Image (cartoon, helix red, strand yellow):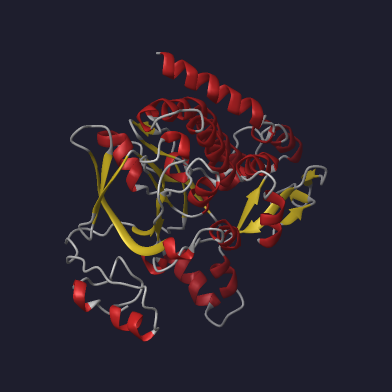
Amino acid sequence: MPDCPPCTSAVCDEHDVCPTARAADGNPERTHDPQPQRVPGRRRPRLAVRRANHLRQELGPNSRVKLLTGGVCGDISHDSGFIEPVTACNAVDPISAHRFSERGAAVGLGTNAQRALEHVLPGRKDDLLKRAGAVPMNSSRSVVGSGPYAGQTIFDLSGADPGIIVHRASLLRELVAPLPQDSLHTNKRLAAINPTPDMDGVELVFEDRTVDRFDAVIGADGIFSSVRSYVLQDDAGQFAASPAGFWDCRNLTLSSWLDGPIAKGMIELCLEQDDLHGYSQWEHKATPTYVNGIVCVIGDAAHATTPWQGSGAAMAFEDAVILKEVLGNITSSTDIKAPFKAYDAIRRPRCQRVIDSSRETGLVLCGQHADAGLDPEKLRALLAPRWDFIYGLDMSAHKQEALHKLREMQQS
């Protein structure tokens, strides 16, 4: 995009096109507010900003919460109703910062994810998933791929309670669709989060030098979250996402080379490397808190996990359910610390258990378990119960547990 001349910014952060283009489209309602030049410094994640008015009515007509989102997780949180409406930012890759988008192919939603989605969007879940093109996973089989047991079945998954598969971009499209298009703005970069002088709010500082004040911030800005750095302060580096010890051999680009004219040369090149690197899977091995006062993180920003148990999206949906529940049971924006603490107390143990279980499941599925190896019977015994605690969550009971914890926080 060319420079926007009046604001001298490399990219006009307040508008998608420069004033000349706006005049050409004949829309007299579009105006331009000049912005100062960008502050130089290291590149940060680009943000797209959704402008809206206030927190839900029970928090008071002047309450403001900012939702910093990173795709599906943030949009499901926005749609959940615990912020109606709210200012939100979407942390996206610089290449696609001109629009709300999601990377990757499909996302799997197990039964717990589907139940959570129903709690977030009561009566709307099925229609939304249908529009997004979700399909049921009616059956699945795992077999040993190599070694003396090659070809033997480890287990079959029945279609009694099928999970569903949906394209990430399609799901995000349907979550964003109900939002007013004139409230979607792009190319916003978060520079800092600062407590207000009176300590009853936070100021968000953007790299275009705009500053705005909010009563609370919810960071759903992904695995390399900027908000997480604020939440963890000096400990952020110690608890940053790290490679989980796996890399995904199902890379579609690699498979497309196999029959091409350069296949032999590429394979030989890889074999010649002493230290061959692959695309790592990342996780948060431990996180001491998801909350710092009136700022919290959810989804991958809080608890990134490997994909071996297909639960990353489900955990984000469950986060949204619990935040909706606890924030819906306070009467003032000054009470936000208590529901954030309750959310942290209820969600963090479960999410960390999923992270640890997923990593261990990956080792089993890769034949790296010290005892089981590639023995199908031993693998079956190890794997069969590993999803029970994930899929078996009683979402209604989980919400009640959160409310009980909220009351404890309010009384302490």
Displayed quadrant of residue 8: bottom left
Q: Quadrant of the C terminus?
A: top left
Q: Nearer the viewer, residue 62 or 285?
A: 62
Q: Residue at x 50, y 20 (%)?
A: 405
Q: Nearer the viewer, residue 1 or 213?
A: 213
Residue 320 point in image, percent of width and height: 53, 40
Q: Is residue 159 above or below residue 38?
A: above
Displayed quadrant of residue 396: top right
Q: Is residue 288 in view?
A: no
Q: Is residue 315 left or right of residue 130?
A: left
Q: Residue at x 22, y 38 (%)?
A: 196
Residue 298 point in image, percent of width and height: 46, 40
Q: Is residue 225 in view?
A: yes
Residue 147 point in image, percent of width and height: 69, 49
Q: Residue at x 56, y 58 (%)?
A: 178
Q: Nearer the viewer, residue 42 or 38?
A: 38
Q: Is residue 113 above or below residue 343?
A: below
